[in-house]
Amino acid sequence: MPQIDYFFTTLSPAAYIAGTRLEEIAARHGAGIAYKPLDIAALFARTGGTPPKDRHPSRQEYRAQDLVRQAKKAGMAFNLKPAFWPTNPAPSSYAIIAAAGAGGDVGTLVQGFLRAVWAEDRDIADDGVVRAVLEAAGFDPGLADSGLLTGAETYGANLEEAVNRGVFGAPFYIVAESDQRFWGQDRLDDLDRHLAREL
């Protein structure tokens, strides 16, 4: 069975706009998904990236226009300037890591955190929000408390793995068997075609 290693941050607007397309592609091709949340600021620092706030105004303006267009194209509610962004992504990331270990629909959980930021103006660093998103996705809200040490270790390990495997942004998808890499929600069609052996 092919595996897609999915590197992302719960702060990424592009990961939010991707919606459920990754999960649909994986289901279509019988592929598994390994969800690997990471510290995007640390990834940028390690791989030559620039945080959005530090980019040239022309880049910031284009990003703003394009995100609105992409969200509209995907038919998704989207707030370009959410009330709680940026915020600390670690609590939501630890919850995702704990949920992946517990089993269940991790894709729905990931999208729940992303939607909380980009469509619902909720602070995913807040414990109450983390618990509510876990519960809404069918997980025990107590996962917010369990495995914090393991979550922190895995979160750090995901960053190291990402750097070592050529990841430099989010969302980033790697097909483990072929080491084919796809950066951005706008490359999901290419990932789909690669798994169909068309690319």
Image (tube, rainbow, N blue to C red):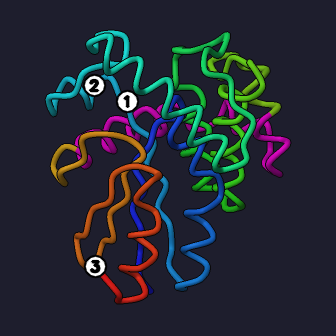
Q: In the image, is residue 74 above or below residue 148?
A: below
Q: Earlier in the sequence, mark 3 or mark 1?
A: 1
* Residue annotated with mark 2: 42
* Residue annotated with mark 3: 177
State the image quarter where residue 51 is shown: top left
State the image quarter where residue 62 is shown: top left
Q: Does the magenta stretch include residue 63?
A: no
Q: In the image, is residue 104 above or below residue 108?
A: below
Q: Earlier in the sequence, mark 2 or mark 3?
A: 2
Residue type marked 3: Glu
| Residue 69 placement (x, y as % from top left) | 57, 38
Q: How crowded is mark 2: few (under 14 residues within 10 Å), some or many (20 or more)?
A: some
Residue type marked 2: Ala
* Residue annotated with mark 1: 39
Does dot 3 land on a helix, a strand or a loop?
loop
Residue at left offset 49%, top offset 23% = 64
Along the viewing direction, whichever of 188 and 62 lies nearer the viewer = 62
- Region rendered in magenta: 133-162
Confirm or deny contact between disc 2 and disc 3 (CB under 8 A). Answer: no
Measure the C-alpha gap from mark 2 to mark 3.
27 Å
Q: In the image, is residue 108 above or below residue 22?
A: above
Q: Is the magenta stretch mostly helix, strand or loop?
A: helix
Residue at left offset 63%, top offset 12% = 84
Confirm or deny contact between disc 1 and disc 2 (CB under 8 A). Answer: yes
Left/right of residue 80 with respect to residue 136 in the rendered view = left
